[in-house]
Amino acid sequence: MNKPFDYIIVGAGSAGCVLANRLTESGEHRVLLLETGGSDKSIFIQMPTALSYPMNTEKFCWQFHSQPEPFLDDREMHCPRGKVLGGSSSINGMVYVRGHARDYDQWQSEGAEGWSYADCLPYFKRSESWQGGENEYRGGSGPVATCGGNNMSFNPLYQAFIEAGHEAGYPKTDDYNGEQQEGFGPMHMTVDKGVRASTSNAHLKPAKKRKNLTLITGAVVEKILLKDKVAVGVRYREEGVDTEVHVAKEVILSAGSIGSPQILQLSGIGPRQVLEAVGVQCQHELPGVGENLQDHLEVYFQYKCKKPITLNGKLNLFSKFLIGARWVLFKTGLGATNHFESCGFIRSRAGLEWPNIQYHFLPAAMRYDGNAAFEGHGYQVHVGPNKSTSRGRVKIISSDPNAKPNILFNYIKTEQDKQDWRDCIRLTREILSQKALEVYSGGEIQPGNDVNSDAEIDAWVRANVESAYHASCTCKMGADNDPMAVVNNKGRVRGIKQLRVVDSSIFPTTPNGNLNGPTIMVAEKLADAILGNEPLPQNHANVWITPDWQNSQRQGKSKRPLESD
């Protein structure tokens, strides 16, 4: 490796695999892709229904935990991050949500020039191959396949949940990734012909055939090599041996929202106080590195089901064998879906222009580890506010790259976040009490009928809320005059030449939805910037907004209104 590579990409995850593909397409550039993890060939990764296994497996996942969270009864929260080819796209729930158009308009208004929805939509389209084919909003020939799983055909509860949302006064939407996010409708996932459509499968697999891509797994990047505030390469350890490799054009960090700020700080780039506290010489003071940490939280709203139609009846070994056998042979059936096939997006209060609460519906009452929540049949929604006002941080505790960083989210620190959760619990209970679900409902399991007052809701949420695993925003993209911006609108690290960050850490704020789709979009867009290509032309597609959003929380009236305390 004496001859420098044109580009070095650190991290073969949701963004890194996209970059590896796009930067090698022309055959003109020599690219080195470094990944700490290894192969993604496990059936537990590739079979969609097995999604609970990889995120709880040390082999495939960085098992990070937060510090005791002061506003969550000092709970240490699980923060898994992908450590395998495909990164978190190989361990996630495969839910495909772009976020709301206004999320990206907000990015631009807050200083990320060129990142409006009109700028981003063409890259969302380029990135995907939607089961319904191309239209004004959806892509029909991109690398990442998106679909509706079994399209709600295996269980009537999916449609019943949509009808319940409509009976509660909310609109229906045929495509929340299209013109209208707000409302209830079918949910989409990154699954290709029954197999997980990770960026490893969609992007890295074809790229690995090219002679101009070098992939090294089992590589722990220790630091970025700097010379006169220019990134000239990286030092990594592989099988106990340190290697330095140099770059002709750029080093690109795609190590994720925990890994990217960690590597920057290990390299002497970040808040001076954080670096000097652990004996790392400050090479370039950049106070925003590791700050602005955001995430989504969710709870399981669970109900007993009077009819024996849920996935709780499929958890015995024989059923699992049949599901697995069908998937192995045909890539169809219950093994070919993540089971989140209907969903909803609502606003928690009047005065919000776009939704801030997201629902994933599951026809089972289960825990995150995939085990049943109780004996019998049940169903649940995963729900939580997506536009938190609380902010956390990531900081190194040592100069040792193997030392896990200190992570603190400060979940539900602000009064607005507390109120959003109260509203969320009450509105969800109202939706799930509608007539459409009455024939199935056997009573609320949790939160439970004794959780009603503000104080009771606050206490239950603190004790039961879980991360949705959407850590982001720790290397914020922003304007030149923003002292906390780490990168500019091209992903370039401020004050350091030949160094970029391209992953979900550069989000200024979290979009209203799951993060894999937006992360892939960011990588697609910045691949053009890295290569010096003209950006794709803007797409000013129409965006549906509730007409009276300033004055109303929902469009219609609930057939069974929420009872006051």
Image (cartoon, rainbow, N blue to C red):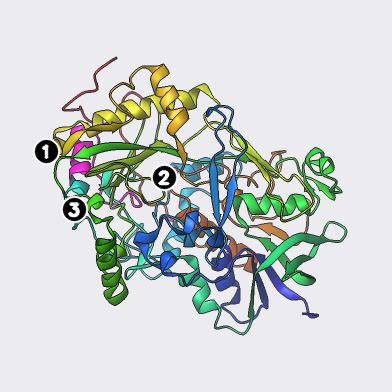
Q: In screen coordinates, is 1 left or right of 472?
A: right
Q: How crowded is mark 3: few (under 14 residues within 10 Å), some or many (20 or more)?
A: some
Horizontal and vertical percent position of residue 41: 47, 72
Q: Does the magenta stretch include residue 177?
A: yes
Q: Is residue 193 left or right of residue 384?
A: left
Q: Nearer the viewer, mark 1 or mark 2?
A: 1
Q: Which amino acid does label 3 sit on?
A: Asn
The residue that disc 1 covers is: 439
User: Considering depth in this image, is 353 or 157 the residue closer to the camera?
Assistant: 157
Residue situated furthest top in the rendering? 565
- Is residue 50 visible in the rendered image? The answer is yes
Q: Which of marks 2 and 3 is nearer the N terminus?
A: 2
43 up-or-down from 484: above or below: below
- Say which amino acid is labelled 1: Val
Q: Is mark 1 on a helix, strand or loop?
A: loop
> Are discs 2 and 3 less than 8 Å apart at CB?
no
Q: Which of marks 3 and 1 is nearer the N terminus?
A: 3
Secondary structure, magenta segment, majority class: loop
- Within 10 angstroms of label 2, few (less than 14), some, or many (20 or more) residues? many
Residue 100, labelled with which disc? 2
Checking the image for residue 155, the label placed there is 3
Q: Which amino acid does label 2 sit on?
A: His
Could you say whether the residue bearing mark 2 is in a helix, strand or loop?
A: loop
User: Can residue 553 be seen at all in this image of the molecule?
Assistant: no
Q: Estimate the x, y position of residue 289 in percent, counting from the top left.
A: 70, 45
Bounds of the magenta span?
160-179
Q: Which of 113 and 487 is in front in this view?
A: 487
Position in image of residue 180 (x %, y %): 32, 46
Mark 3–mark 1 Cα distance, whole angstroms, equals 14 Å
Q: Quadrant of the N terminus?
A: bottom right
Which residue is rendered at x = 48% and y = 51% of the image?
A: 515
Q: Are marks 1 and 2 in contact (CB under 8 Å)?
A: no
